[in-house]
Image (cartoon, rainbow, N blue to C red):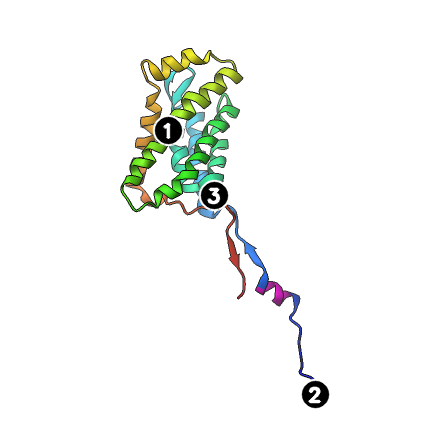
Amino acid sequence: MNHKSFTPPTCVEGFMKMAEERLPLLTSRQLAAAAVFGGLGFAWRALGLVIPIAPPFVVDLRQVLIIIGAAAAGPYGSMIIAVLFALPSALPVADIFYYGWQGLIFCIFYKRLYYMKSRLRWVLLSVLIGFLAFSANAFMSMAISSFVFRLFPYWPMFLTTWVFPGIGYTWVIFEIVGFLVTARGAPRLIVPTWSWTRPKAKVGS
């Protein structure tokens, strides 16, 4: 009786056909963007290059960098940026929440808005950035500083900063203009190549 020769596949061959190689959660581009923007914000704050608005609140470059950095580095990269931003701050925990929250919420909507086939996307992105700037400053940052750290009473600060004379809107204008100028001058920088999930690359066929 003739038997056909049969060679069972080796474990390596079977693995190469069926296994999936998991790619890094952050690409080199995203890590570089997080390091550059986070490092720049760290240096900016450590050197005290800020514009006082209503003590203890200031306007500084980090408020623009977190938006541009989130666009370039994605949600996980934006958290790295937020931590680096917070290190030289007098209230690092508050800054991590403040910048991290903005970066994550921005990423939730940014990719969908960016790839819209309409010029309306820039209007919607401006509205999103303005909303984040307002809510993060008027509610989150002030609430943490007032109710957690007891630095000042909340409502008097809210009224004097946002209602009269409304100087808090400097944050809103600053972030929107900074993002739009970057989009115009360096459009490739803000292309969202990142993903919320770890990408997978199939090995073999």
Q: Residue furthest bottom?
A: 1
Task: Please identify the quarter of the rendering in which residue 109 is found.
Answer: top left
| Secondary element at image label 1 | helix
Asked whether, in this view, residue 87 is left or right of residue 193, the answer is: right
Q: Nearer the viewer, residue 4 or 31?
A: 4
| Secondary element at image label 3 | helix
| In contact (CB < 8 Å): disc 1 and disc 2 | no
Under mark 2, the amino acid is: Asn
- Distance from disc 3 to disc 2, alpha carbons, whole Å, reads 61 Å
Q: Pointer 1: what residue? A: 131
Q: Is residue 144 above or below residue 132?
A: above
- Mark sitting earlier along the chain (3/2): 2
Asked whether, in this view, residue 42 is left or right of residue 128, the answer is: right
Task: Please identify the quarter of the rendering in which residue 40 is found.
Answer: top left
Task: Indicate yes or no whether the magenta region holds residue 86.
Answer: no
Label 1 Cα crowd, 10 Å radius (few <14 / some 14-19 / many 20+)? some
- Mark sitting earlier along the chain (1/3): 3
| In contact (CB < 8 Å): disc 3 and disc 2 | no
Q: If the image is split into quadrants, where does the N terminus sit?
A: bottom right
Q: Is residue 183 visible?
A: yes
**Residue 31, numbered label:** 3
Residue 106 is situated, as x and y percent measured from the top left of the image, at 41, 35
Task: Indicate yes or no whether the magenta region holds residue 15.
Answer: yes
Q: Is residue 47 visible?
A: no
**Number of labelled discs?**
3
Q: Which residues are magenta?
A: 12-17
Q: Residue at x 49, y 13 (%)?
A: 151
Asked whether, in this view, residue 181 is left or right of residue 3, the answer is: left
Label 2 Cα crowd, 10 Å radius (few <14 / some 14-19 / many 20+)? few
- Distance from disc 1 to disc 3, alpha carbons, whole Å, reads 27 Å
Q: Pointer 2: what residue? A: 2
- Mark sitting earlier along the chain (1/2): 2
